[in-house]
Amino acid sequence: MSYQTYTLSNGLKLIYKPDKTAVTYCGIVINTGSRDEIESEQGMAHFIEHMLFKGTGKRRSGHIINRLEHVGGELNAFTSKEETVVYATVLNEYFERAMELVSDIVLHSTFPQKEIEKEVVIILDEIQSYNDSPSELIYDDFEEMIFARHTIGHNILGKSETLEKFKTEDASRFIQNHYQPHEMVFFVLGDLNFNQLKRWAEKYLQTSTVEERMISRTSPISYTPTRLEVDKNTHQVHCMIGNRAYDLYHPKRLGLYLLNNILGGPGMNSLLNLSLREKHGLVYTVESSFQPFTDTGMWSIYFGCDTENATRCEQLVYAELQKLREQTLSENAMKKYKLQLTGQMAISYEQKENLALSLGKSYMRYGKIEELNSIKKKIEAITAQELQDIANEIFNPEYLSVLKYT
């Protein structure tokens, strides 16, 4: 059996994938991220992710930190544009402890003002540290440029002037508005009895009141390509080139994943790495990425180089994009690239934490889990002509935006 599911009366969904191992991976995916903040709340979703560890109705922060670590387990969390995820890793015999703790901090956090004041200082330091790293900061600035005047482009960490105003009642109001059980998925990867798992879910994840408040999101407005150079007084030039792209449900999404992997994926044999680094020796890092969201997406290229090589690097990038737009990949090349992507996916599936997280997010977004063999068949069905059509749509120079730090 691949996986089993169960839905509580409050709407919260449970998904379990059996795995014969001594360790269980579990957590909650919440359909709330930085794009769901209003202007005065910028940074609130990420801030709450931090504050979930600072106290509940029955625990103080020290108790939360030690609850799993005393038995060798781990508790962690992260925030994205559209999700907040709290997850844990423990030995099988301590799973109930992990499930109870995760549910307690997600459903019963109290956000003490004293802890808020301490955590604001920590996040402000995180923001400053991020601002000191242009190779990371440029990604956020580029997203803001691609999704101008829309919350999906906002920096997940937020703004210091907004963070400094956060109070207990602000966090509580955000939780009440967005942390709805029917917008949550509890995921489990491990060696457990599913009937027992359902009983624990009823005990720890059930809520006394059910108020279905649907997440309402507005899609980004029309896109205008932009070119911008910002004087950051950096040693290197940092450059981003990109475009809006397909959403999570678009039929061409998998084709763009494959095309992006060919162009600038993690393999050292990516076209951009072979050109800019291996052949010409102009960069240390060059990569491309595709990030789909529920109603839009973004594709981008990043490279960093010496000032005197910036123009040449940009020309080489455009040359590789033009080849993909004008030349159809050969049958042998397609076979090689498909094998590479499916191999990377199979290896990723062997990393149990990644598998558990994808379990929760896939069930949240698609209401099902697609097996690796099914995805592999879809990749094998993609044609060279389809990739060329996607390249002409997404890599069209007329629609590309450029951001440079100089």
Image (tube, rainbow, N blue to C red):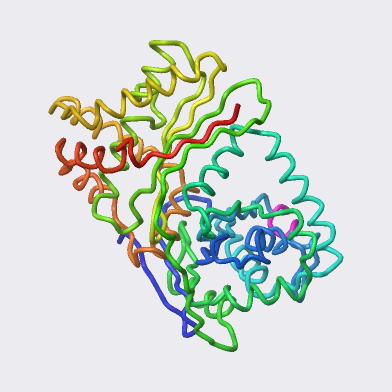
**Whole-percent x and y of residue 42?**
65, 61
40 sits left or right of 84 in the view: right
Magenta region: which residues?
65-70
125 in relation to 187, above or below: above
284 in relation to 81, above or below: above
Indicate whether residue 50 is drawn in magenta.
no
95 in relation to 321, above or below: below
Indicate whether residue 68 is drawn in magenta.
yes
> Can residue 143 be seen from the camera position used here?
yes
Quadrant into which the N terminus falls: bottom left
Q: Residue furthest top?
A: 280
53 sits left or right of 298 in the view: right
Quadrant into which the C terminus falls: top right
* Magenta segment, prevailing SS (helix, strand or loop): helix
- Residue toward you, 276 or 107: 276
- Residue toward you, 96 or 220: 220
- Residue toward you, 312 or 72: 312
